[in-house]
Amino acid sequence: MNSVLFLVVIPLLGTFISLFNKKVKEMTFLITLFNEIFTIYIITCVGLPKIAIIGGFLPPYGINFVLTDLSLLFIFLVNTAGLISMLVINEKKTSKFYSVYLVLLAANNGLVLTGDLFNLFIFMELSTFAITALISYKRDKVSSGTGIKYLILSSVSSSFLLIGIGMIYKTLGTLNIADIAGKLNLLSVPTLSLIILLIFAGILVEIEIFPFNIWFRRLIFQQMPALM
Amino acid sequence: MSLTNLFLISSASLIFVGLYGVLTKKNIVRILLSLNIIETGINLLLVAFGYVEGGIAPIITSSESIANLTKMVDPVPQALVLTSIVIGLGTTAFALGLTINYYKNLGTVSISKEEEEKINE
């Protein structure tokens, strides 16, 4: 079941091609449509759970992609949102917009599918870059100011996430998410609280859940209509 | 004090120095410098997690190194640090590019209340 990697690889490949291609919009639409059809194929034809092993290292050691019913739901949501946003865009955009959009699609697919904690960090950083580039796409006063603020805040919060991941590796000796879930009751309560605090501080600032979203409000109301 | 404790304490102090800089400075370039200090502290922390006192490099070259497998330092944190150095470089370059854009639009590189009002106009 290693073909699930196509969901991440083909948008990234499209990013490089879109730098030299004239018909960028049609190509981006085709890639998004391919992702959606491939997701529906995975949902209907593949038994669960599946593990895509990368590089030949068996699960507790190598990097792997995991398909469970939860990650199936989320890849369906991500790809449907991508398709809808491709249909909603009606203004003329430069090719940079579509390359950044493809990076965002690949990063979100990888974020949902990965089974390795450090890969999660990498995909999160990748999607942060793509979101920042989309925010500051118009290059006027508001977008450049909000873009740099978003980049600074999310870099600081993702460094907390990295400290938490490092502490998990130090205490449990593994980075595989399924393996961590099995070993988590070996930790003492203070260590577990510190790790949970660090990881949640990283993730919650980056996805703007309620107590952390005060700085984000202006950015949504002023920037999101500009992107359509 | 053992060498590992020295590494841990110095990395924690680097992280907090950088956090102080991010929270108090108003110049964007200084904020980015403080971000880099935080990243350096995290890299030192990750390397210190895999450190072994009197260890050898984790490369199998001869029968002597195979005999000393337990004395090798952990190679996984070093791989993580290489990746996180590259990510930090990308963040810094991208943020400096955005800073040039900010300077062209507002004529300054500081984030403060006056600039907020200028943006909101």
Image: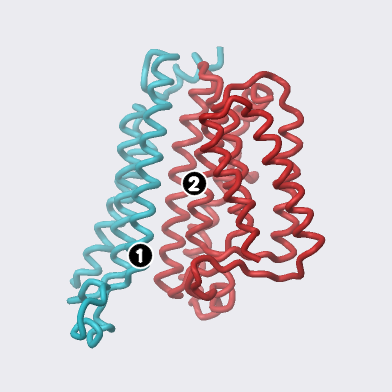
Numbered tag placed on residue A125 in the rendering: 2
Chain bearing mark 2: A
Task: Give the residue at mark 1.
Answer: B77
Classify residue B10 as left or right of residue A163: left
Chain B colour is cyan
Three-letter amino acid code at the position of disc 2: Glu
Q: CA distance from mark 2 to mark 1?
A: 18 Å
Q: Secondary structure at mark 1?
A: helix
Q: Which label number is shown at residue B25? A: none
Q: Is residue B15 left or right of residue B62?
A: right
Q: Nearer the viewer, residue B40 or A32?
A: A32
Q: Mark 2 and mark 1, same subunit?
A: no
Of B55 and B118, nearer the camera is: B55
Q: Quadrant of residue A68?
A: bottom right
Estimate the x, y position of residue A140 in percent, counting from the top left: 52, 16
Q: Nearer the viewer, residue A121 or B61?
A: B61
Which quarter of the figure is the C terminus of chain A placed in?
Answer: top right
Q: Place residue B90 in its image quadrant.
A: top left
Residue A60: horizontal and vertical position, in percent?
51, 75
What secondary structure is marked by label 2? helix
Task: Identify the residue shown where x is 34% and y is 57%.
Answer: B81
